Amino acid sequence: MAITGAVNLSLHPAKYVALSQSRFLSSDGRCRAFGEGGDGYVPGNVP
């Protein structure tokens, strides 16, 4: 058996600066993509 996995790390600060300047990030840091009060994106690997 072979164990295969993949990791997607986007740790460069420019990613978070661009997301913030474009107002893509959630204002309260909580992900509610389609829920009431949802207003942004929360990356899964926030440092």
Image: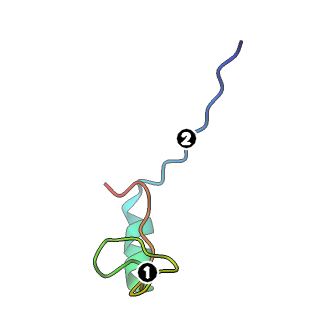
Q: Secondary structure at mark 2?
A: loop
Residue 47 coordinates in the image, percent (x, y): 31, 54
Q: State which tag comes first along the sequence, 1 or 2.
A: 2
Query: What amino acid type should be assigned to the residue bearing mark 1?
Result: Gly
Name the residue: 61% across, 37% down.
Answer: 6
Compared to residue 7, the image places residue 5 above or below, namely above
Quadrant of the image for the N terminus?
top right
Q: Quadrant of residue 32?
A: bottom left
Near mark 1 (Cα within 10 A), the count class, few <14, some 14-19 or many ≥20, is many
User: Given the current orientation, which residue lies at the most extreme front position?
Assistant: 36
User: Given the current orientation, which residue lies at the most extreme right position?
Assistant: 1
Q: Which residue is mark 1?
A: 40
Q: Which residue is mark 2?
A: 7
Front: mark 1 or 2: 1
The mark tally for this picture is 2
Name the residue: 34% across, 71% down.
Answer: 30
| Numbered badge on residue 16 | none
Q: Secondary structure at mark 1?
A: loop
Left or right side of 9 for 30: left
Q: Quadrant of residue 4?
A: top right
User: Given the current orientation, which residue lies at the most extreme top position?
Assistant: 1
Left or right side of 10 for 16: left
What is the distance, in whole Å, between disc 1 and disc 2 at their CAs? 24 Å
Residue 33 coordinates in the image, percent (x, y): 50, 76
Left or right side of 33 for 2: right
Residue 44 coordinates in the image, percent (x, y): 44, 57
Name the residue: 44% across, 63% down.
Answer: 43
Compared to residue 31, the image places residue 4 above or below, namely above
Near mark 2 (Cα within 10 A), the count class, few <14, some 14-19 or many ≥20, is few
